[in-house]
Amino acid sequence: MYKPQWDTLVTTKEISSLDQMAKDFLVVSDTYTGTLTDSYPYPMYRELRENTPVKDGDILAEYKVPSQADYAMSGRPVMSVFKYDDVMSVFRDPLNWKSYINGDGFGAAVDNLMFTAMDGEEHKKFRKMFQPPFQLPVIRSMNESLIRPIIKNEFIDALKPNGKADLVREFSLPFPVRVVYAIFGFPDDSEASMKFAGWALRILGGPQVDPEVFKVTMPAAMEAGQQLFEHVLPIIQARRAEPEQRDDLIGFLLNVENDGVKFTDVEVATFVRMLLLAAAETTSRSFANMLVQLFDNPEVMEQVRNDRSLIPQTITETMRLEPVAAYLARIADKDMELSGKKIPAGTAVSLCIAAANRDPSKYERPDELWIKRPMRPVLSFGFGAHTCMGMHIAKVEMEAALDMLLDLPNLRLDPAYPRPEIRGMQLRGPDAVHVLWDTE
C-alpha cells in the first residue's frame, strides 16, 4: 500500500503558505483515496446499486479510507447504502437516523462543536440561530461588491498575462479560501487565509485507518485545531472592541443571542473555527471537478461559454456526476429497514452519494454530462435538516469564477502534462489541471 508523505503535516521547513496548503491538500487526497486503484469507481457502484443496494460492512473501510460511519474505528457495525431512494429516506428521517457520529473523528480538534454532528432540538436551535447570514439573498448581495472583485483582481487578472496555470494550485485551491475569509470579515491578508486553510486541511487529514499513520496525523490535527483557534480569538477580541460592528459574518456572530445572551469571544472563536473547517476545501474540489468534466466534454464547455445563463445548471450537474463528498453517514436510532434489509439499532450506514446521484431510476442517462437535464434533488450538498449551510456561498462563488475563467481566450488543456483525472473514494478531485490560453 502506498503511503502519502505524512511528514508534510509536521514539517517546519519555511515554505509559502500556499505551497504548504497544496501539500496538505494532496495528503488529504491520498488519505481519502486509500487503496482504490481505479479513479472511476462508478461501474462498481452500478453493480452494487443493482445487486446489493444495502451491503454488510463499510465499503470505505474495505479500501482503507477513513469513514464518517466509524471514524473512531470502534468496531461499530456498519452497512453501505447505494440506492437513491434509500439514501433519501435516511436524509428525510432525522428522528430515526442520527448524525452525532459525524463528530467522532476530527470533531475533537474543534472541541466537538460541529453542526453536522448535532441532532434534534439542539441542531434546530443552532441551525436557526446561525442560518440568516448564509441565505441566498445575503450571499447574492455580496457578489458584485466582494466575491467577483476578489476573484477578478487577485486571481484572474494576476494569471491572465501568464498564458498558463495549474488551475488547482493557482486558482481553485486558493480563491474559495479568500472569498470565504472576506465573507467572514477577517483582515484582508491572503497569506493568513492560506495558513487558516492549511490548518483546516490538516484537521481533515486527522482520521486514518492505519494506526501508525494515525499516531502522526491525529496529533497534527489537534495541533492545527488549536493553532486555528489561537489565531481566530485575537481577531474576535479586536472586533469586539471596535466602536461599530461591521456587517459581516463575524459581526453577526458577535451580536447573535442565545436565549437572550450574547456569545463570549471564546465561544464565537470556537464557532468560527467550526464553520471554517468545511468552508473552502469542498468548493475547491467541486470547482476543479467541474473543470475536468468540461474539458472532457468540449462541446458542453463551448455551449456554456456562449450562454452564461447555463452556469448554475452546469454547477449542479457536474456536482451530481462528481460529488466531492461521495459518502455521508448516519446511525440507526432504532431497528430500521432499507431495501428490505433490516438495520439493527446502533448500526451506522455509509451513504454513497456518488452512487445515488447516478441512479437510473431517478436520472435519465445518469452517466452523461447533460446540463439541461430535468432537475430533481441532487444529494451532493446533502438533503433535509442537514443540507450544507454553506451551499449558497459555494454556488455563487463557483458561478462567478467559472464566468470569468471562460473569458480567457482559447482556454485549453496543456498537452505538456497528463490529462487530469478525478480520484478518490471520498473528497474526490484532481491533483492538478494544467491549462493554456492565448495572451494576444
Image (cartoon, grey):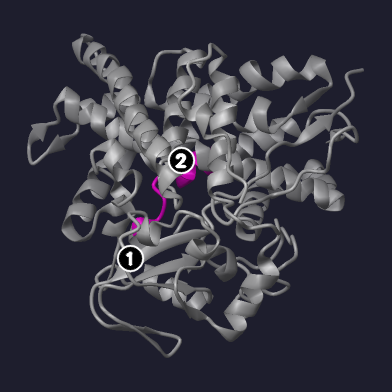
| C-alpha separation, residue under disc 1 versus residue under disc 2 | 20 Å
The dot on residue 75 is 1
96 left or right of 376? Answer: left
Specify the segment rendered in magenta: 386-396
Task: Please give the residue where the numbered disc 2 appears in the rendered image.
Answer: 205
Residue shown at the point (24%, 44%) measured from the top left:
112
User: Toward the viewer: 166 or 204?
Assistant: 204
User: Taking 338 as reference, is 375 above or below it?
Assistant: above
User: Taking 237 as reference, is 105 above or below it?
Assistant: below
Is 176 in the magenta? Answer: no
Q: Position of residue 30 (x, y in %)?
A: 58, 44
Q: Amino acid at mark 1?
A: Gly
Which secondary structure lies at badge 1? loop
The dot on residue 422 is none
Q: Position of residue 350 (x, y in %)?
A: 44, 66
User: Toward the viewer: 196 or 405?
Assistant: 196
Residue shown at the point (90%, 24%) measured from the top left:
438
